[in-house]
Amino acid sequence: MTHRPTARRRPSRPASRPAPRRSTARRPLAALLLPLALLAAACTATPTEERTTEPRRNTRPSPFAACATLTVPPPSAAPTPAGSGGAELPELTLPCFTGGDSVALRDVRGPAVVNLWASWCPPCRKELPAFQRLSERADGRLQVIGVNTRDSRDAAQSIGEDFGVRFPVLFDQGESLRRALNRNAVPLTVLVGADGRIRHVDTSGALDDARLAALVREHLGVVVPA
């Protein structure tokens, strides 16, 4: 009896599994992330867009006085002392915080006390009430002028409202006056004579009532009670 060779069976291959499908849950997530990325880009661009030499349009009434009187001599100002010297104010024109026409610094009529300040500067905030009191006690013998520098309009307005600052304020976002005076920091106070020339630039820090009265008496010849 002849035996036929047994045919060897080939091992069966496992059935191929279908390739897993990519989850579609990531697509809605990507769609949500795109607007967020665009929003973040717009926020980072905001500070650059706000850096301008012109204040934005008022969104609420300004606490500061108008600037029209800055080019008119104070009503009770003393005549210019003979032989007075000093440099003129820089040839700059700055917008008034409260609105209206811009003011050329060369047209400002003294005696005047010009204070450069910013809301982010602690010594500035400390001395601003003293400048407000000086403007009230001067009784028309000199002008007190603020120059808000490298600041946002909303922050400056809040300082004026919170501290009761009412004297006129110019807006100098680009720090042009500080640079023209070749000074590095604020607060900075400039005393201007009746002839429009700079008599003294003070950078000693926050000024109080007594120190302000002494500076005004010494450099402007105006006696104001402290």
Image (cartoon, helix red, strand yellow):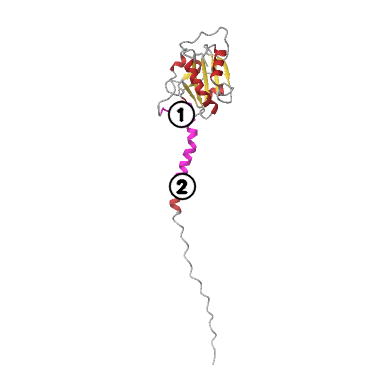
Write down the residue under mark 2: 33
Residue 61 rendering spot, x and y as whole percentages? 40, 26
Span of residues in magenta: 35-58
Magenta segment, principal secondary structure?
helix
Q: How many marks?
A: 2
Toward the left, the furthest residue is 60
Residue 161 as seen in the image, left or right of residue 226: left
Image vertical order of residue 176 relative to residue 3, above or below: above
Residue at mark 1 to residue at mark 2: CA–CA distance: 36 Å
Image vertical order of residue 40 relative to residue 85, above or below: below
Q: Earlier in the sequence, mark 1 or mark 2?
A: 2
Q: Residue at x 44, y 48 (%)?
A: 32
Question: Would you say residue 49 sits in the magenta stretch?
Answer: yes
Toward the top, the furthest residue is 82
Label disc, if present, on residue 158 of the rendered structure:
1
Badge 1: how crowded within 10 Å, few (<14), some, or many (20+)?
some
Residue 209 seen anywhere in this rendered image of the structure: yes
Residue 107 seen anywhere in this rendered image of the structure: no
Residue 90 rendering spot, x and y as whole percentages? 54, 18
